[in-house]
């Protein structure tokens, strides 16, 4: 049996020894009369509403459309389109004969 309580088997107590913990000991404020300010809660800004997001999308599309129209107008001013010739037909459809010729119908005996 050892002579000192710190030698051999540890002595169990319900309170921790503040001298053993030293600087690592958690300092619990015991004076309830001291007013300590509460930590400020971080507030996150509210998310954008769906209507605001949709309005931004519509504005972006509207601006892009306006830019495309302006670009086309500038292109037409720089190089005006050539007017079509009266004697020359427009495209392949105008060159074709528009006469309907029905195909032959095969009878039920021929497969």
Image (cartoon, rainbow, N blue to C red):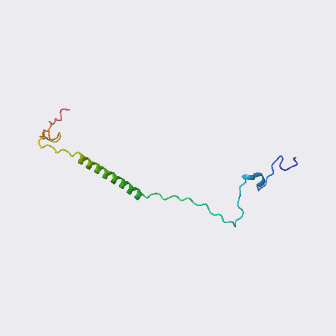
Residue 80 placement, left or right of 67: left
Question: Which quarter of the picture shows residue 88?
Answer: top left
When the figure is inspected, residue 62 is found, relative to residue 93, above or below; the finding is below
* Residue 66 in the figure: left or right of residue 13: left
Picture quarter containing residue 17? bottom right
Measured as percent of width and height from the top left, residue 21 is found at 75, 52
| Residue 50 point in image, percent of width and height | 42, 57
Can the viewer see residue 70 in this picture?
yes
As rendered, which of 21 and 100 lies closer to the eye?
A: 21
The furthest residue to the top:
110
Q: Position of residue 95 (x, y in %)?
A: 14, 39
Q: Quadrant of residue 16?
A: bottom right
Q: Looking at the image, which residue is at 75% across and 52% down? A: 22
Q: Residue furthest bottom?
A: 33
- Residue 26 shown left or right of residue 8 in the figure: left
| Quadrant position of the C terminus in the picture | top left
Please state the horizontal and vertical placement of residue 4, each as a whole percent of the image: 86, 49
Name the residue: 36% across, 53% down. Answer: 60
């Amino acid at each position: 049996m050892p002579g000192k309580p710190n030698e051999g088997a540890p002595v169990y107590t319900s309170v921790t020894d503040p001298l053993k913990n030293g600087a690592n000991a958690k300092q619990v404020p015991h004076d309830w009369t001291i007013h300590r300010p509460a930590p400020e809660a971080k507030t996150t800004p509210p998310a954008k509403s769906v209507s605001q997001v949709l309005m931004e999308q519509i504005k972006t599309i509207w601006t892009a459309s306006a830019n495309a129209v302006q670009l086309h107008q500038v292109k037409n001013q720089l190089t005006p389109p050539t007017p079509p010739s009266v004697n020359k037909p427009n495209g392949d459809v105008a060159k074709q004969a528009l006469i309907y010729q029905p195909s032959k119908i095969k009878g039920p005996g021929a497969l």
